[in-house]
Amino acid sequence: QVQLVESGGGLVQPGGSLTLSCAASGGIFSINTMGWYRQTPGKQRDLVARITNDGSTNYADSVKGRFTISRDNAKNTVYLRMLSLEPEDTAVYYCNLVQRPGPFQYNYWGQGTQVTVSS
């Protein structure tokens, strides 16, 4: 059973930084994509950034140049380094893993971690 455990959220002042971590365990296929999404109340969950097992990345336009996604394949862990945080970045951040070990694609989510940017 795949589990994703996030850490690193919290309260930070505008202009500050945070790093989120997400460790995956249980039945991880070597070829996968891990990423971060965020959601605010009443809105849909949106992609922030994702990274493939071979290091290809893509980012939401709103975070380009401020956020960096990276991963450690040996640890099945993905990171999101967030700089120059803005109040608009306040949201629950969810870790995501997508893998296709056979004919079907599987999509997994973490429990979410709150990021609040406020003075």
Image: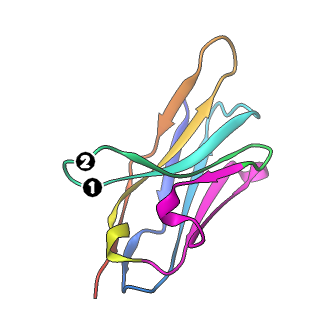
Residue sitting nearer the eye, 11 or 3: 11
Say which amino acid is labelled 1.
Thr
Q: Are marks 2 and 1 in contact (CB under 8 Å)?
A: yes
Q: Residue at x 61, y 44 (%)?
A: 34
In the rendered structure, does residue 86 fall within the stretch colored magenta? Answer: no
Quadrant of the rendering where the C terminus is positioned = bottom left
x then y, percent, for residue 72? 74, 55
Q: Quadrant of residue 67?
A: bottom right
Which residue, given by chain and number where applicable, does mark 1 sit on? 40
Quadrant of the rendering where the N terminus is positioned = top right
> Label 2 to label 1, Cα distance in Å?
6 Å
Q: Residue at x 59, y 33 (%)?
A: 98
Q: Is residue 20 above or below residue 14?
A: above
Residue sitting nearer the eye, 62 or 30: 62
x then y, percent, for residue 55? 77, 50
Q: Quadrant of residue 117?
A: bottom left
Find numbered disc 2 in the image and state the secondary structure of the residue it sits on.
loop
Which residue, given by chain and number where applicable, does mark 2 sit on? 43
Residue sitting nearer the eye, 20 or 50: 50
Q: How is the image coloured?
A: rainbow
Q: Looking at this rendering, what residue extends furthest in the front direction?
A: 61
Q: Is residue 80 above or below residue 102?
A: below
x then y, percent, for residue 90? 33, 68
What segment carries the magenta color? 57-85
Q: Is residue 82 above or below residue 30?
A: below
Q: Is residue 91 left or right of residue 93?
A: left
Q: Residue at x 51, y 65 (%)?
A: 63
